[in-house]
Image (spheres, grey):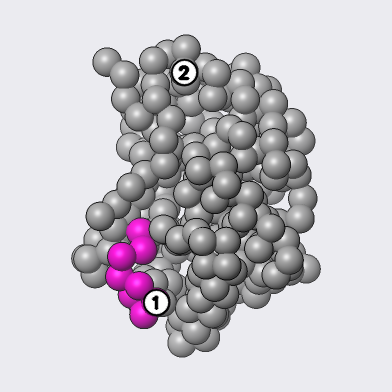
Amino acid sequence: MARTIDLNADLGEGVGDDEAMLTVVTSANVACGFHAGSPTILSRTCRAAHGAGVAIGAQVSYPDRAGFGRRHMAMDAEDLRADVVYQIGALRALAATAGAPVSYVKPHGALYNTVVSDEEQAAAVVAAVLDVDPALAVMGLPQSTILALARDAGLPTITEAFADRGYRPDGTLVPRTEPGALLTDSALISRRVVDLVTTGTLVAVDGSTITVDAESICLHGDTPGAVEHARATRDALRAAGVDLAPIRRT
């Protein structure tokens, strides 16, 4: 039986082919300036996403432009909370000029990985989302601390898996510094996503099969061959009878 899945990509970072990716994905995780992007780029990305009927999410990050948000930072909870509020607010203002809403929040890079298990930082991000708008959904890994705290706080949540990233047996991502972290073959990526969407499982880096409950699939826009990976994945999902649409939470 056909099911529906959301395809998301990190956009507005000033790298990759955002225009092409917006013809494939159904949700755009738009950078908020702390790890990449400029006000002009973010505004342009919001307009393009809205014009393409693509949902917009705030891709919040540590203040780490030099490291593209991929370096862990031991931030004070109050500072992190304020930083996330600032980023969501800025993107919402830019999106509003395009007549577009921001419907969810997704941490980026090292912050994303940290809030999988770090309760203090996860709580700071959840508190920031609540401060801005309790109707905003939080996107993250299934079984992560941040999604558990978001649900406890009454926030909508979106579970996510990654098309082009390797997984550990415990369902977390293989760090980019380790072998098997990044997949580069479009055919392999697309088959893997179809299996994930239709069976709820994927093969971890050690060869074991793990269960992953995902409502949205991330296609990184800054990796080599990103557009080809995205198109192959979209086409394979459609061929398998899977519909593509952004997630709507009410």
- Please give the residue where the numbered disc 2 appears in the rendered image: 238
Please, what is the three-letter code of the amino acid marked with disc 2? Arg
The residue lying at 31 percent from left, 19 percent from top is 2
Reply above or below: 6 against 116: above
Instruction: Specify few, some or many for label 1: CA neighbours under 10 Å numbering under 14, 14-19, or 20 or more.
Output: some
Reply above or below: 239 against 45: above
Q: Is residue 148 visible?
A: no
Q: Quadrant of the N terminus?
A: top left
Q: Is residue 88 visible?
A: yes
Instruction: Specify few, some or many for label 2: CA neighbours under 10 Å numbering under 14, 14-19, or 20 or more.
Output: some
The residue lying at 77 percent from left, 50 percent from top is 15
Question: Is residue 132 highlighted in magenta?
Answer: yes
Left or right of 227? Residue 123 is left
Q: Quadrant of residue 6?
A: top left
Q: Tell me which segment is drawn in magenta.
A: 130-137
Depth check, front residue: 52 or 135: 52
Left or right of 226? Residue 23 is left
Residue 168: horizontal and vertical position, in percent?
A: 48, 39
Residue 108: horizontal and vertical position, in percent?
A: 57, 59
Which of disc 1 and disc 2 is earlier in sequence? 1
- Please give the residue where the numbered disc 1 appears in the rendered image: 132
Depth check, front residue: 209 or 225: 225
Q: CA distance from mark 2 to mark 1?
A: 36 Å
The residue lying at 52 percent from left, 17 percent from top is 236
Reply above or below: 135 against 191: below
Reply above or below: 57 against 61: above
Q: Quadrant of residue 104?
A: bottom left
Residue 154: horizontal and vertical position, in percent?
A: 22, 66
